[in-house]
Image: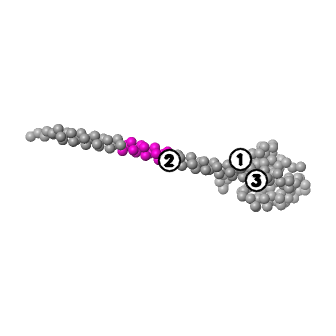
Amino acid sequence: MRFRPSAALALALLIWLLAVGGHWIAYNESAEVLEESVRTREVDKINTVSKVLKGLIALKESDAKLIARMVAANSAVGQAMLPKGTERERAVRLTEVLGPIFDSNRFQTLEVTDKDEVLVYRAKDRTRVGDKAIGWGVSEALAGASVTASVRSKEGVLIHALEPLRVG
């Protein structure tokens, strides 16, 4: 005896096959949609964090510029920079003027160079002077331009605001 499927069985198998095929297609499409949704959400998070960081960096940059301009405009700083006496005496004068400024503000570094790009004052290590300034923008500031630069350091990224100081 041979098995002959009835039309109803064939129709049921066809409906089952269509249902399984439809579920398989829906599963694949929903996986793609979910993957694209997650990717879009992650990109949105990155863009949001980027906007927040750009705003914070712009705020810190404007703070650094303002502090640099205020220090450069301070006539006592200019007077302390005058080449009167020895280098050691000039360093003491700069420490007297710039020490309180550095200690009372929220910046991490404060350095002063002379016209030859030699450090004459360093707030964090006030005894170490005479090194050649290696930071970017020093020569531009000595030429009279206000410069903002960022540099990597052990603490992270620092924003340097360089302002020309006119003495005399």
Which residue lies at the image location 76% right of the left edge and 48% below the top edge? 162
Magenta segment, principal secondary structure? helix
Q: Mark 1 points at which residue?
A: 149
Mark nearer the viewer, 1 or 3: 3
Secondary structure found at label 3: helix
Q: Residues within 10 Å of mark 3 (few under 14, many from 20)?
A: some
- The three-letter amino acid code for the residue at tag 2 is Arg
Per the rendered image, the range of residues in magenta is 27-40
6 horizontally vs 21: left or right: left
Which residue lies at the image location 29% right of the left edge and 43% below the top edge? 20
Return the disc, 1 or 3, that comes first in the chain's sequence: 3
| Residue furthest left as drawn | 1
Q: Name the residue under label 3.
A: 67
Q: Tag on residue 41?
A: 2
| CA–CA distance in space, label 3 to label 2 | 39 Å
Identify which residue, 165 or 135, lies in the foreground: 165
Q: Can residue 152 be seen in this view?
A: no
